[in-house]
Amino acid sequence: MNLTNMMAFLVFPYLALTTFVVGHAYRYIVDPFFWNAKSSEFLEKKNLYPGITLFHWGILLTLLGHAGGLLIPQTLFDMVGIDGQAHLRVAYWSGLVVGAAAFVGSILLLWRRATVKRIQATTTLNDYVTLAGLVFVTGAGLFNVVFGHFYVLDTIAPWIRGIVFFQPNPELMSAVPLSYKIHILSAFALLGFSPFSRLVHIWSAPFTYLLRRHIVFRRRVADASVQYVD
Ligand code: HEM
């Protein structure tokens, strides 16, 4: 077995995933007051909206597409009449739209951080690394969608399932083109970095907001004409 391949596609993914899980748990316990997205909306709105909206729709749908397209085995798609070629066509067109949204959105967010004075003044090196990392990972993914055309369903897909279900087989990655390897390794590096950044906010999506009761902010003014009887 090739040592470089084993380090890159067996040791490194598990190192990144361990850091991801343990790091988030540790940070949640020791640093609860900084567990948030560090919103900058109150400092500047106009340039925030296009970038943040494009980016969030793009990245959330991209993550959903990766989970559905790579973690579900092709045999299950075959059973419902979606063969490998049809699967890849759907992946291509949907990946093009949502991947481009995530890529352009992350560039807009990085550009805002670097150029808008008030945002620049409150931006840390960690914020730049986070956004530059997102630009790189989404850019590399989009590059593969447009120029790659590699058949991933019997190489990368079973490899990532092996990692997730603890039956790793790094050999599956040996014939994969470099541009795909770069996308995968940079994505795992970003996962490992996530607990140390504002990306922790992903785990506190306010879903309960949809279910909670209304909060009444105005006090009901007593009507003097109404007689209250005990
Ligand atoms: C689970 C659903 C998510 C929710 C509810 C959410 C919510 C938010 C909110 C409220 C902000 C602050 C915007 C502001 O400045 O006012 C934000 C910023 C941010 N989010 Fe998310 N987010 C989610 C998922 C994600 C994901 C999956 C990623 C990336 C993998 C991500 C990356 C970012 C980044 C990098 C920023 C900072 C942008 C900047 O200020 O330059 N978010 N998010």
Image: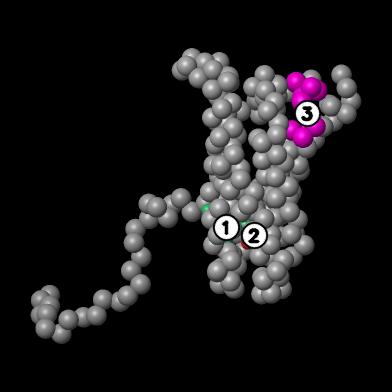
Q: Residues within 10 Å of mark 3 (few under 14, many from 20)?
A: few
In percent of width and height, residue 50 lies at: 55, 59
Indicate yes or no: mark 1 CB to ligand 1 under 8 Å. Answer: yes
Residue found at x 54% / y 17%: 83
Name of the residue lying farthest toward the right: 3
Q: Quadrant of residue 40?
A: bottom right
Which numbered dot is residue 177? 3
- Give the CA separation, mark 3 to mark 1: 32 Å
From the image, state whether disc 3 or disc 1 is nearer to you.
Answer: 3
Q: Disc 2 on helix, strand or loop?
A: helix
The amino acid pointed to by label 3 is Pro
In percent of width and height, residue 152 lies at: 67, 24
- Please name the predominant secondary structure of the magenta segment in the image: helix
Q: Residues within 10 Å of mark 1 (few under 14, many from 20)?
A: some
Relative to the observer, which residue lies in front, 113 or 222? 113
In percent of width and height, residue 176 lies at: 77, 25
Which numbered dot is residue 109? 2
Which numbered dot is residue 147? none
